[in-house]
């Protein structure tokens, strides 16, 4: 039962004293969302709720008007009432009374946004962002407030959280969500109103964890999470676990809308995400009982394990725009970092999210999105692509022809010639006389360069919906001394046939079909795909065969390699096989822990040599550093060596994986090659493993 009356303040205070005299044991309580410095949504009937004694009368008074609200708690001691808020402003105070009185101070009225997702939403300024120091120095923004919901999981919906509102300042802003802060800053600067951020995110969390349990349990396809996430998965993934503990307690706090930055953890089930993500959005809206705006960030390019894993999530996010009304998407393909899943340009992400809110919620006349794929048609040998949000026209920034690809019925995509006609993209290729499909930036690591004239980037897209098939091909190569070449064999899993190429291009349905082992007698890159029915596997297996004069020759180790990373066998340094930059577990790598690499190659006889090169890995995330010095020496007798390379390396703080080649050119007859790589010994003081033994990882030593 709800009573709303208007009475003089003196009468109100007398009433409170009277009720206190009746029962001193009863106490009124409100959720943690209701605290000092809170922000309430402007111009709305805003729910207030809490707990008291059963059938107790709770009285609420707000300093922005003279209305007194009264509500009776039910038999479960719960109460709820709607309170009318004015236009943006403040600060105000709120009194909530029963036998006790709660007074909330410095309450602002403005715009309230719920921000959620995984680590890119959770990422704070203190974690490292572009122009970090300047952003913090300029963060004295008292109209911006945040409440950070603690990271919790629960099997059942929870009633409350343990948190409080904070006013934005240089002391508090470093702990705010950086994306949410820059979003709020953009609104505040354009609208000059208070902005409240409810921040509920958890790094590594999957969409399943944020989706209400009733949705997860009633859809058989969503049950596939059991096949994707192992039991020891270190981040939240169990259905509804974070929704129950971090989102449900916020209901029904009135919000203007929600912001979302997540998807990286769902690259393993991207096709399920097509339906799961819209279902999650709908579940949140059902919980609040109104269709609030939901704006989200399309994940940025990154080196995911399997081809198109990231692209398929980007596609699912693009499709969500049409599946869920009232949604908007900020594209980030031009501001990512393919070697860092946490791009540091959070300001631009926040601003692009704010464009959607400003255009759709706050009546500002501006473009909120980059070009979004609308339709395609084929005219002769050309594919003509049309877009939404491209009324101002299209332009391309820089030369990246590999982003634009077309294919015929053989489903083999090739680079396309690109033309722009106003707001249309025209693609063609002499290799595809009858095109049927086009793709733009549709790879895990594609960094887009197509924009509208509002300087907003286009979303990646594909015009086809061909099934994506993954099948690994094992490429084996064995040196055959008789023929002095490598015998190459291919093995596929669940494949009707295997197609391959030897010229460094991806094979298609019309490429050479594997029928048995073949001989390679020169430096060659073998690329292979499986074919099942008429479906070509999306992932390509590749191996570079390094046919050179040191292949399978004798190697003497003056310093033994690490027991952790001994390589495939002692000949791993000269077996003609390249190591994988992104897999430190690849047995083609040989590692030395804390000590130097020192090896001698015996070519078997005096040999005319033009070039000697070797490669090393840097992956500081795994304690692997480049040598601080590499020396290459040669000899004709194995006793006297002439140094032909001595290259020092300055070790810098750089967490991106790097493969570096050290090479020496000569034109001489030699028999022995000595390679020494000096280990830095211990991880530098600025490294998390400071003082621990550092590794050097060596790859093939090639002699041409």
Image (spheres, helix red, strand yellow):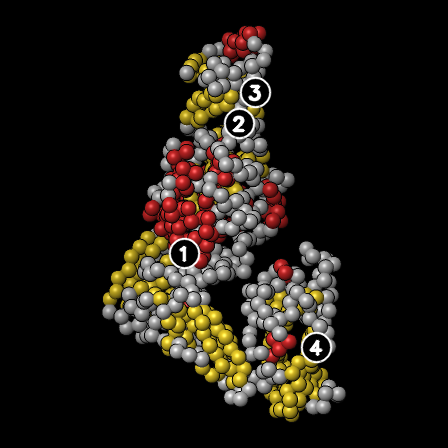
Examine the image and state in which quarter residue 602 appears.
Answer: bottom right
Cα–Cα gap, marks 4 and 3: 76 Å
- The disc at residue 31 is 2
Give the Cα distance between marks 1 and 2: 40 Å
- Residue corresponding to mark 4: 557
| In this rendering, the label closer to the viewer, 2 or 4 | 4
Nearer to us of marks 4 and 3 is 4
Q: Residues within 10 Å of mark 2 (few under 14, many from 20)?
A: some
Considering only order in the chain, which callout, 2 or 1, is on the residue closer to the N terminus? 2
* Numbered tag placed on residue 102 in the rendering: 3
Question: Image quarter for residue 593?
Answer: bottom right
* Number of numbered discs overlaid on the protein picture: 4
N-terminal-most mark, 4 or 3? 3
Q: Please tell me whether mark 4 sits on a helix, a strand or a loop.
A: strand
Where residue 530 appears, as percent x and y from the top left, is: 40, 69
- Counting residues from the start of the chain, the first of labels 4 and 1 encountered is 1
Seen at 56% across and 71% down, the residue is 579
Q: Is residue 306 above or below residue 195?
A: below
Disc 3 secondary structure class = strand
Tell whether 232 sits left or right of 310: right
């Amino acid at each position: 039962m709800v009573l709303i009356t208007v009475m003089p303040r003196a009468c109100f205070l007398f009433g409170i004293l009277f009720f206190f005299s009746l029962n001193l044991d009863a106490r009124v309580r409100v959720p943690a969302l209701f605290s000092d410095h809170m922000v309430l949504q402007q111009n709305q009937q805003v729910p207030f709720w809490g707990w008291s004694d059963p059938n107790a009368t709770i009285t609420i008074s707000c300093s922005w008007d003279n209305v007194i609200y009264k509500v009776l708690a039910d038999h479960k001691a719960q109460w709820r009432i709607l309170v009318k808020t004015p236009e943006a402003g403040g600060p105000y105070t709120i009194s909530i009374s029963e036998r006790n009185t709660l007074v909330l101070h410095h309450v602002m009225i403005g715009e309230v946004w719920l921000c959620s997702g995984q680590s890119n939403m959770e990422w704070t300024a203190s974690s490292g962002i572009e122009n970090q120091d300047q952003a913090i120095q300029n963060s004295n923004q008292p109209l911006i407030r945040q409440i950070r919901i603690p990271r919790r999981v629960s099997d059942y919906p929870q009633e409350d959280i343990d948190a409080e509102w904070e006013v934005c300042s240089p002391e508090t802003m470093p702990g705010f969500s950086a994306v949410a802060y820059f979003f709020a800053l953009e609104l505040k600067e354009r609208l000059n109103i208070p902005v409240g951020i409810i921040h509920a995110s958890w790094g590594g969390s999957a969409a399943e964890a944020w989706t209400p349990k009733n949705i997860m349990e009633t859809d058989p396809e969503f049950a596939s999470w059991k096949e994707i996430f192992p039991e020891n998965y270190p981040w939240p993934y169990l259905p509804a676990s974070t929704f129950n503990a971090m989102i449900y307690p916020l209901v029904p706090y009135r919000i203007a809308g929600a912001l979302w930055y997540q998807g990286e953890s769902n690259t393993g089930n991207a096709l399920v995400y097509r339906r799961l993500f819209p279902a999650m959005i709908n579940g949140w809206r059902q919980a609040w009982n109104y269709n609030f705006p939901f704006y989200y960030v399309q994940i940025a390019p990154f080196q995911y394990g399997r081809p198109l894993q990231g692209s398929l999530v980007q596609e699912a996010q693009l499709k969500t725009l049409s599946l869920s009304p009232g949604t908007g998407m900020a594209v980030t393909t031009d501001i990512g970092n393919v070697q860092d899943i946490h791009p540091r340009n959070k300001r631009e992400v926040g601003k692009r999210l704010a464009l959607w809110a400003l255009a759709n919620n706050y009546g500002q006349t501006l473009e909120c999105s980059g070009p979004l794929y609308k339709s395609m048609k084929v005219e002769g040998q050309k594919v003509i692509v049309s877009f939404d949000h491209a009324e101002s026209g299209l332009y391309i920034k820089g030369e990246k022809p590999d982003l634009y690809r077309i294919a015929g019925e053989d489903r083999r995509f090739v680079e396309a010639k690109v033309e722009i006609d106003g707001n249309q993209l025209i693609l063609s290729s002499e290799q595809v006389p009858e095109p049927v499909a086009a793709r733009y930036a549709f790879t895990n690591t594609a960094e887009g360069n197509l924009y509208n004239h509002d300087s907003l980037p286009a979303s990646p897209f594909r015009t086809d919906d061909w099934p994506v098939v993954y099948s690994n091909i094992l490429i084996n190569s064995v040196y055959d001394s008789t023929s002095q070449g490598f015998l190459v064999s291919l093995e596929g899993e669940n494949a009707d046939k295997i197609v391959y190429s030897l010229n460094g291009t991806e094979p298609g349905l019309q490429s050479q079909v594997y029928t048995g082992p073949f001989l390679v007698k020169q430096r060659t890159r073998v690329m292979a795909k499986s074919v099942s029915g008429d479906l070509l596997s999306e992932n390509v297996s590749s191996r570079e065969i390094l046919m050179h004069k040191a292949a399978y020759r004798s190697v003497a180790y003056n310093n033994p390699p690490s027991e952790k990373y001994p390589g495939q066998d002692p000949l791993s340094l000269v077996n003609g096989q390249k190591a994988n930059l992104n897999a430190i577990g690849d047995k083609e790598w040989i590692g030395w822990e804390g000590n130097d690499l020192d090896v001698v190659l015996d070519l078997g006889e005096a040999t005319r040599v033009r070039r000697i090169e070797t490669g090393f890995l840097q992956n500081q995330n795994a304690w692997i550093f480049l040598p601080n010095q590499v020396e290459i020496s040669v000899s004709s007798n194995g006793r006297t060596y002439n140094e032909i390379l001595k290259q020092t390396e300055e070790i810098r703080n750089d967490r991106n994986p790097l493969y570096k080649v050290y090479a020496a050119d000569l034109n001489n007859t030699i028999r022995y090659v000595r390679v020494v790589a000096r280990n830095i010994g211990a991880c530098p003081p600025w490294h998390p493993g400071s003082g621990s033994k550092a590794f050097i990882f060596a790859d093939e030593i090639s002699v041409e």
